[in-house]
Image (spheres, rainbow, N blue to C red):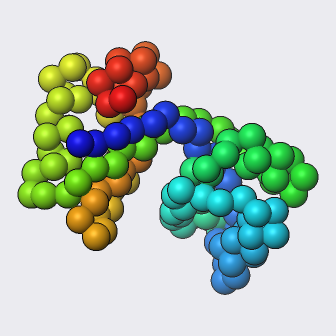
């Protein structure tokens, strides 16, 4: 049985150079901010964009403020469940059948479980929450 939760996510723009992610990770460790998810991409023109999904949004907001980081806050849906061939597809089919438009997904599988972050149109958040919780 899959379980899901609506969560806050935060994006941060950093210079695209060696050590920036390590510096951010050290700052998070120092502030005792635990993340559920972290990923990033080079965005061009010497910039990189990192996305953080913290266990506690308020703690992350306080951290970002005290560190002087400019962040953009959004929301994501975190879905986890037992992994088998087609397990994620079953959920994607349910989402599509409900007429919910997804913007993005990040998914991984490990030790027989899958986990994914899902982003949708803002007008679909309530329907997505009803479907996945």
* Residue lying farthest to the bottom in this orientation: 18
Q: Where is residue 122 shown, x and y percent of the image?
A: 46, 22
Q: Residue at x 51, y 62 (%)?
A: 39
Foreground: 18 or 131?
131
Residue 61 sits above or below residue 52 on the image:
above
Residue 117 sits above or below residue 34 on the image:
above
Q: Where is residue 96 shown, x and y percent of the image?
A: 19, 28
Quadrant of the drawing holding the N terminus: top left
* Residue lying farthest to the left in this orientation: 85
Foreground: 52 or 30?
30
Q: Residue at x 81, y 69 (%)?
A: 30
Residue 20 visible in the snapshot: no
* Residue lying farthest to the front in this orientation: 1
Q: Where is residue 64 shown, x and y percent of the image?
A: 80, 51
Q: Where is residue 112 shown, x and y percent of the image?
A: 23, 65
Which image quarter: residue 12? bottom right
Residue 27 sits above or below residue 87 on the image:
below
Report the side of 15 relative to 93 (left or right): right
Q: Residue at x 29, y 57 (%)?
A: 114
Q: Residue at x 74, y 70 (%)?
A: 29
Q: Tag count in the figure?
A: 0
Report the side of 97 relative to 114 (left or right): left
Residue 123 sits above or below residue 12 on the image:
above
Quadrant of the drawing holding the C terminus: top left
Residue 110 visible in the snapshot: yes
Report the side of 68 relative to 82 (left or right): right
């Amino acid at each position: 049985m899959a379980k899901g939760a609506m969560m806050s996510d935060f994006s941060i723009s950093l210079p695209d150079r060696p050590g920036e992610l390590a510096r951010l990770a050290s700052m998070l460790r120092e502030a005792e901010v635990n993340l559920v998810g972290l990923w990033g991409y080079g965005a061009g023109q010497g910039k990189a964009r990192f996305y953080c999904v913290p266990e506690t949004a308020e703690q992350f907001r306080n951290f970002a403020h005290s560190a002087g980081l400019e962040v953009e806050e959004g929301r994501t849906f975190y879905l986890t469940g037992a992994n088998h061939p087609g397990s994620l597809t079953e959920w994607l089919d349910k989402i599509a059948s409900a007429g919910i438009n997804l913007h993005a997904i990040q998914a991984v599988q490990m030790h027989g479980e899958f986990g994914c972050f899902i982003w949708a149109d803002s007008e679909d958040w309530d329907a997505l929450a009803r479907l996945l919780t």
